[in-house]
Amino acid sequence: MKYLQEVARRLHHCRDLGRPEPFDFLTWFEFAPEHSAAFHALLAELRASPEWLFVEREIDIRLQRVAA
């Protein structure tokens, strides 16, 4: 909730994606370039949480919109 104004988050259970995947959950974050500091702070807090002990693998893919 702390980053809700700057960072949008969607959590998907992979069984809902239509085919088996090698991971249980997929998390999608969206933020404007000016909110990248808030996104990095959110990641730091997530990685420091007790729940992170259950994370076996993290894949970080970053996409950026390019103005046409």
Image (cartoon, helix red, strand yellow):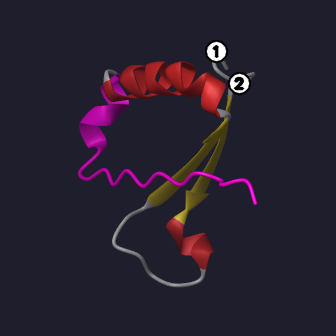
Give 67 or 45, whichever is nearer the viewer: 67
Q: Is residue 52 magenta?
A: yes
Q: Position of residue 40 (x, y in %)?
A: 45, 25
Q: Quadrant of residue 16?
A: bottom right
Q: Position of residue 65 (x, y in %)?
A: 65, 53
Give 5 or 1, whichever is nearer the viewer: 5
Residue drawn at x 69%, y 24% as measured from the top left:
6
Q: Residues within 10 Å of mark 2 (few under 14, many from 20)?
A: few
Determine whether, in the image, residue 18 is placed left or right of residue 32.
left
Residue drawn at x 55%, y 20% as measured from the top left:
38
Q: Position of residue 29 (x, y in %)?
A: 59, 43
Q: Secondary structure at mark 2?
A: loop
Q: Position of residue 43 (x, y in %)?
A: 43, 29
Residue drawn at x 67%, y 20% as measured from the top left:
1
- In three-dimensional space, the C-alpha distance between marks 1 and 2, rounded to whole angstroms, equals 6 Å
Q: Marks 1 and 2: CB-CB under 8 Å?
A: yes
From the image, tell me which residue sits under label 2: 4
Q: Secondary structure at mark 1?
A: loop
From the image, tell me which residue sits under label 1: 2
Helix, strand or loop for the magenta stretch, by majority: loop
Q: Is residue 62 magenta?
A: yes
Residue type marked 2: Leu
Q: Which residues are magenta?
A: 49-68
Residue type marked 1: Lys
